[in-house]
Amino acid sequence: MSIKVIGILGSGSMGSGIAQLAAQSGYKVLLSDVSLEIVEKAINNIDKQLTKLIEKGRITKEEKENVLGRIHKFSDIESLADADFVIEAVIEEEKAKKEAFKKLDQICSPDVVLATNTSSISITSLASVTKRADKVVGMHFFNPAPVLRLVEIIRGYYTSDLTISISMELAKSFGKTPILVKKDSPGFIVNRIMLAQYVEAIRLLEEGVASKEDIDMAVKLGLNYPMGPFELHDFTGTDIAYYALNYLSKEFQDARWNPPLALKTIIRAGRTGRKVGAGWYDY
């Protein structure tokens, strides 16, 4: 199967990052969201990221313009009908994703693979609303997508070997290292490990064992992580972690995945945070 056009639904931090990555890899990109204003904001952010690469001497001004020229903006999902491969990157909420997949299944050619960038939600469940369950796959990138090397390729119950192969090869063409998640288990690999650590970090804070700054420092220096758990989730969005933990708690029926009180408090206060050092846990 020849893939030349990548459709991306959702232009938030992950969708825009994947769009940049795909365009840098030479693909034509159809980037769609609920309004052109949101998509334009994403493209402006991509412009800034590419400018930084110019300043570092990694790309030229001409290459930047070529990358931006490959990204086409839309405010309707129907525009993705011309895509050879679609990656969904909407909010990390099962109902919203199912609605997206139902629409994509109706407008995309029957041979087109529909991938989801979900970090936790069941691929099999999302595939159930389509008539192409064999062509639905998890393709979980990490934030920032143009930088981090890993992509989790997740097999749903009905996902075919061909779909897995196509997705693996696409990830490699992006310059990424894909790994296969053989079983459609909530949280897959990385999030299941990371969220367990995040919950423990919040509990340490709640118990007064240490400050969030010292917990972050302990993880960075003791475990050699580039960011501490609070820094990381201030960057990626505490709301995403909250949704993922609720999903894991529901799926596993295990209290260890329940979002801690401190996380619930900041979510209820609307302080979702996507800025390192924002201090959202000082409640």
Image: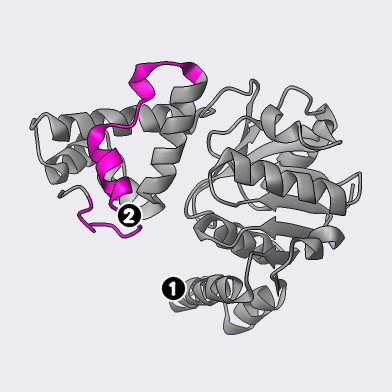
Q: Residue at x 43, y 32 (%)?
A: 246
Q: Is residue 108 magenta?
A: no
Picture quadrant of residue 43: bottom right
- Give the amino acid at mark 1: Lys
Q: Position of residue 103 (x, y in %)?
A: 78, 50
The relative height of residue 45 versus residue 204 in the rendered view (above or below) is below
Q: In front: 195, or 146?
A: 195
Q: In front: 232, or 125?
A: 125
Q: Earlier in the sequence, mark 1 or mark 2?
A: 1
Q: Which residue is mark 1?
A: 56
- Give the amino acid at mark 2: Gly
Give, as a single range, the part of the protein colored magenta.
Answer: 252-280
The residue carrying pointer 1 sits among few (fewer than 14), some (14 to 19) or many (20 or more) residues within 10 Å by Cα, namely few
The relative height of residue 75 versus residue 186 in the rendered view (above or below) is below
Q: Secondary structure at mark 2?
A: loop
Left or right, 133 with respect to 213, comes to right
Q: Residue at x 46, y 36 (%)?
A: 244
Q: Which residue is mark 2?
A: 270
